[in-house]
Image (cartoon, rainbow, N blue to C red):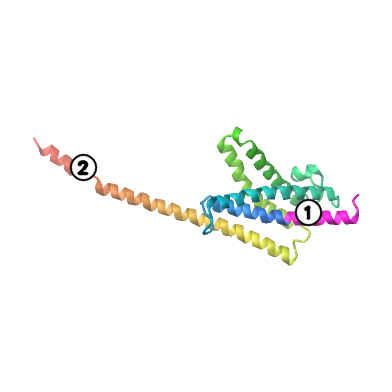
Amino acid sequence: MLNDVSSHALWWSTRATGLVSLALLTVVFVLGITGVKRWAPRGWPLFAVGAIHRNASLLAVVLVAIHVSTTVIDGYVDVSWWSAVIPFTATYRPLWLGLGATAVDLVLAVIATSLLRSHLRHRTWQTVHWAAYACWPIAFVHGLGAGTDTTTVWVLSFDAVCLVAVVAAVGWRLSSSTSVSRRHARRVRSMAGAGLAAAPDRPALDARTRRSP
């Protein structure tokens, strides 16, 4: 059994890495959504946004690993290594910890497919990568249910900021996609109209042809 000082340090580590991981996952989610549309802040090159996205992802993976490790090692609650990766097998708050294990599994799937990308079909890799976007809402709900201080004002404010950022990014992506679809539809209609205007009057031409000897 760990002494009180060590246990307290592990509890703080679990708490801190959980919150910072959520912040990093929020950054990854937002940049992933906006990066698909090749967006970057004014004056920023696109590769800089890509680098932030990649480094934030790697740092999030490290912090998630620390978060899981400190939770298991602490021993304050009965959380085994198996229940940290096999969803809904924990005896303590099985629903909320099961969601956390699901998020961990998604992260592991992304890591595995990224390492094996050269041996996988692009569609398989892309499917797993897109499924990883489910990691954010799952991790968010996990934090709300499993956290010990989720009712405090500063944690609620922190969660609210992350939620607003994700909702804004998704809304921007949907509105941008709708605008692109509308512009494409107008372009197709205009091209079709121009083609009809340029086409010869075939019936009249055929009529003149028939009257000629």
Q: Which amino acid is tagged 1?
A: Thr
Task: Return the residue found at the far bottom.
Answer: 153
Counting residues from the start of the chain, the first of labels 2 and 1 encountered is 1
108 in relation to 71, above or below: above
Q: Which amino acid is tagged 2?
A: Arg
- Per the picture, the main secondary structure of the magenta-coloured stretch is helix
To which residue does mark 1 refer? 14
Magenta segment includes 139: no
Residue 186 in picture, x, y percent from top left: 37, 53
Calculate the distance from the C-alpha at mark 2 to the C-alpha at mark 1. 77 Å
**Mark 2 or 1: the one toward you:** 1
Q: Residues within 10 Å of mark 1 (few under 14, many from 20)?
A: many
Q: What span is in magenta?
A: 1-18
To which residue does mark 2 refer? 202
Q: Nearer the viewer, residue 116 or 199?
A: 116
What mark, if any, has residue 90 been given in the picture?
Answer: none
Q: Quadrant of residue 111?
A: top right
Q: Quadrant of the C terminus?
A: top left
In the image, taking residue 130 as reference, residue 63 lies left or right, namely right
Asked whether the residues under the numbered discs 2 and 1 touch, taking CB atoms below 8 Å apart as contact, a structural biologist would say no
Q: Nearer the viewer, residue 141 or 123?
A: 123
Q: How many marks?
A: 2
